[in-house]
Amino acid sequence: MSLENLEEIEELIENKEFRKIKSELEDENVVDIAEFLSELENKYLAVIFRLLPKKKAAEVFSYMEKDQQMVLLDLFSDKEMKDVMDSMFADDMVDLLEDMPANVVTRVLGKVDKETREAVNKMLKYPDDSAGSIMTIEFVELAPDMTVAQALDKIRQVGIKSETVYSCYVVKNHELLGVVSAKDLMTNPVETPIADLMNENIISVHTTDDREEVANLFRKYDLIALPVLDVEDYMVGIVTVDDAIDVLTTETTEDMQKMAAMTVSEESYFDTSVFQHAKNRIVWLLILMLSSTFTGMIITKYENAFAAVPLLVSFIPMLMDTGGNCGSQSSTLIIRGLAIDEIHFNDIFKIVWKEFRVSMLVSLALALANGVRVYIMYHDLSMAVVVAFSLVFTVVVAKLIGCMLPVFAKMIRLDPAIMAAPLITTIVDLCSIMIYFKIATMVFKL
Amino acid sequence: MSLENLEEIEELIENKEFRKIKSELEDENVVDIAEFLSELENKYLAVIFRLLPKKKAAEVFSYMEKDQQMVLLDLFSDKEMKDVMDSMFADDMVDLLEDMPANVVTRVLGKVDKETREAVNKMLKYPDDSAGSIMTIEFVELAPDMTVAQALDKIRQVGIKSETVYSCYVVKNHELLGVVSAKDLMTNPVETPIADLMNENIISVHTTDDREEVANLFRKYDLIALPVLDVEDYMVGIVTVDDAIDVLTTETTEDMQKMAAMTVSEESYFDTSVFQHAKNRIVWLLILMLSSTFTGMIITKYENAFAAVPLLVSFIPMLMDTGGNCGSQSSTLIIRGLAIDEIHFNDIFKIVWKEFRVSMLVSLALALANGVRVYIMYHDLSMAVVVAFSLVFTVVVAKLIGCMLPVFAKMIRLDPAIMAAPLITTIVDLCSIMIYFKIATMVFKL
């Protein structure tokens, strides 16, 4: 039997076979236990939780979902609360308390020591997307005049309470002098002075730095942890690689939501209520819907044209879709390139030139394919010419708009992700319909 | 002065002031040096590279771009080649050799020891997206009957050549018995037997597992490294967190490319040629362009309708855009949820029910806004009713199609990312135009 079998465990609880459950839980990973608890009815939550050993319970608690954490916090005795909080890292505590009501925050922080309380209070004040909000304060601090042996002793003392012991920080008067890896400590003679071993070429961030830029540093330099400095350049905490991965995931999800014209939400799909989903989606839909009425108005202007040549109407969907797709291809590549630091906004001319050449190749191929198709299907050369030329202009315009808008957004410090498919499509639609009817009225002399 | 100043360094090379360059490079991070080299002209490459200390040179080499690695490989003496290869990890060597011509592969592998050569050859045969292709063979292997002191000795011996020493693997007869962290080794008494310390609840993967699933395990369990087993369950290598981050980044970029109707490419934007860009984009554009001609054909069928009521044409863009946007909102949420393992395909009924309720809320709001606008602008109640009802049906259909197709794709083991905005839009367009003209002909009795 394993944790997979929810009903069996619920039966065991009903039958009060606690020893059996305890032995089940013993070998399980904390993440798996938290996941298992999330599927359990809330009434069983406290029972199971209290079967876990103290240290493991705290770890499981960090991985639990917010609503379940709330349930437990309500049920905890003062002693239990203190035990869990003592074993929790500051960054997990900040995650826990972020959206909690003030009375819960006060009660929880009342159970931790003064130093942690002050640090957590400070971290709660950092903006949501800053390095300060994802850092933790539990790290191994070494002095430059220590030897490797003394450093190893220090790790033995504080190791359990540190989120990572694999990067150690050499600090003097709050100032970060260098970084020593645990690998260096383990592979060098015990009498080596730390000052000789430390790497002084430090990659660090400030509490107010954007968390996405912090995460990108992990990717670029293959880091396990990164020191965080405050405004006075004092070392105040570290960010660890697991938090960096979470940031990369969250930021990507947010980018995708923006790119699909939604208001950003950090909640998971199922945790978001139907009403909230609707709210997240309606704003952009309304804006874009009203914008695309302009395209409709342009069409109304050419009523006489399609009264004379009704076939004209039937190419509108193809032109609009192709324009939208071309624009979103370009904008997606640029938005992603900007996000992972592969493209910078001073590359704008290189980008435009590249997209122009790509759009020429693509548009000629599409125009040829469609021109031939129209000629074969309708035996109407003028119509084939109109469709082909409209396609060429539409594709070129779409690709140029698609690549430029994200870069402009970046320049004026907006998020490039909002300049994605939906907005680009609406703008490109307007252009393509104008181009199309302009060309049509010229060719058909309407 | 720092590496930022390209021209100054080029001047230093021209003036043969090598000692100065050498001292410049001394304090720089290997990633920054590789980045700096990528901007340097190729003719200066070897000069600078040879100024680096042996060990650092190999690290820089791993971080360099492929075309520059090629240039250097051509220039290397046998001795230089051996030095660099000896310091390189097997996974970096696989990355290097993956797309190289056979003669280069042979020459490079001729310089490494037999064991490495065999391992690299094996890894080169794993599919591109498998765990085997991203693993490395340099890890710390412990025996269960060792003590902590013996384990630390072993790390001192093999630590330099291991990609990570922070996760050590307890192996007996090739079989993985447990994992010990360096933290445990550093914080426990030296006489403790490894067998007592090791965690037997091992999270592991197989060489043939999908690399994205492997990366997702890192995210879920906050890992630093993960053991890889072969078909016989023998331990053959590890995947480290930096490679997992690279996989997450690459997979997300690929998902975004697919979602924007492009053929996937692992090359960066600027490294991809104009011709290749065009090739990556044209296939889907052609497919989607031809599909949207069906929508055009439907419109042609209703020629009499818009001949009688020309205003009908002007709402086509608004309906198409809104339908497309609604569909892509739903499909984006589902595709992302599936990718990060938040949504599973047996959630299909929960998803459909949720999206249906969301679409009811959204569509009623949009229909109301637009119906009122149409009535105010054109004083035409029938037209307002047609537009409003068409919107309601279009939005509901769009959201249902948008949420179902990615899940179906997952069910039949296709990549859900191809069921994204462009394809959904094309399908939804067809539906919305049909719905619209059906309702219009009914209301206007055409």
Image: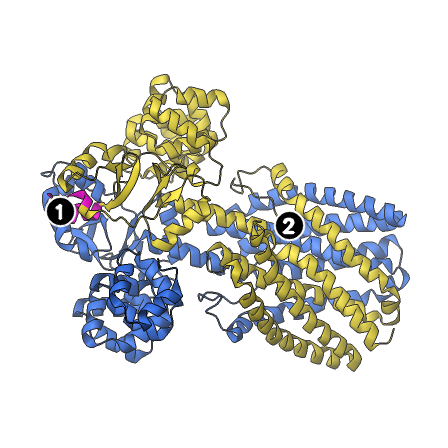
Chain colours: A blue, B yellow
The residue type indicated by label 1 comes to Ala
Extreme residue toward the top, this view: B78
Asked if labels 2 and 1 touch by Cβ distance under 8 angstroms, the answer is: no
Chain where mark 1 sits: A
The residue located at (69%, 41%) in the rendering is A361
Classify B382 as above or below B240. Answer: below
In the picture as drawn, the residue positioned furthest to the front comes out as A15
Q: Is residue B323 left or right of residue A250?
A: right
Q: Residue at x 84, y 76 (%)?
A: B444
Residue type (three-letter) at the residue carrying disc 2: Lys
Residue visible at 36% across and 17% down in the picture: B78
Give the secondary structure at mark 1: helix
Residue pointed to by mark 2: A399
Residue designated by label 1:
A151
Of the two numbered discs 1 and 2 in the rendering, the one whose residue sits closer to the viewer: 1
Q: Quadrant of the image for the C terminus of chain A? A: bottom right
Which segment did they paint magenta? B182-195
Q: Which quarter of the rendering shows the N terminus of chain A?
A: bottom left
Residue at the spot x=30%, y=67% of the render? A94
The image position of residue B76, as x and y in percent, is: 39, 20
The answer to whether residue B31 is magenta is no
Q: Position of residue A145 (x, y in %)?
A: 10, 45
